Amino acid sequence: MFDGVPVVEACKRLEAAGADVVGLNCQRGPKTLMPIVRRVREAVSCHVAALPVPYRTTEAEPTFQSLTDRGCNCIPGGRPFPTALDPFTCNRYECAEFARECLALDVRYIGLCCGAAPHHIRAVAEAVGRTVPGSRYSPDMSKHAFFGTDATIPDRYKDRSAEI
């Protein structure tokens, strides 16, 4: 925290002061937020919220503001944040995995923050067992022309080693 209070301690203080929900949002991606979410969940008995940014942050670069892109030297200012984060975006499956991990910890306020797209939010909802209006757009890979298993897909399409 900017005031020097460790995050877990801040959440404990908030709960002691009467907060019904404590938690974290923004800055960190799913992989770098989850360890903190675990520690908060262990430290408090109230509800916990977890809303990471959908970016692949790392231990070395734990926030999306700290990400660097060694593969690109044309970014103005040299930092991907805030306008060149595209190559760091999590996929829907990473977001769903985060949501399932939260649910297993009894973290019930689950979402995403800056940079989330509809397919990310839908994946989070479906991962925790919800069917939302947008679920009708979820991929049905059984219908995929080359990778699907549906009986209506011609065998010649399924043989990906053949010339098409």
Image (cartoon, rainbow, N blue to C red):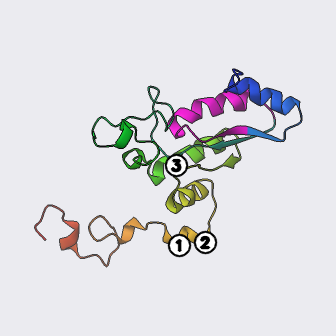
Task: Determine whether 15 is above or below 116 in the image.
Answer: above
Which is nearer the N-term, disc 3 or disc 2?
3
Which mark identifies residue 95? Answer: 3
Quarter of the N terminus within the rendering: top right
Q: Are marks 2 and 1 in contact (CB under 8 Å)?
A: yes
Residue named by callout 1: 136
Give percent across and percent down for residue 34.
58, 35
Task: Determine whether 59 is above or below 101 in the image.
Answer: above
Write down the region rendered in magenta: 23-45
Quarter-of-image position of residue 3: top right
Q: Are marks 3 and 2 in contact (CB under 8 Å)?
A: no
**Amino acid on which the number 1 mark rests in the picture:** Arg
Quarter of the C terminus within the rendering: bottom left
> Quick one: which residue is furthest to the left in this view?
163
Is residue 142 within the magenta segment?
no
Q: Mark 1 falls on what kind of element?
A: helix
The residue lying toward the viewer, choosing from 161 and 98, is 98
- Say which residue appears at 64% left-offset and 34% top-offset: 37
Q: Mark 2 falls on what kind of element?
A: helix
Which mark identifies residue 133? Answer: 2
**Amino acid on which the number 3 mark rests in the picture:** Cys
Circle 3 residues within 10 Å: few <14, some 14–19, many ≥20: many
CA gap between label 2 and label 1 equals: 7 Å
The residue lying toward the viewer, choosing from 100 and 134, is 134
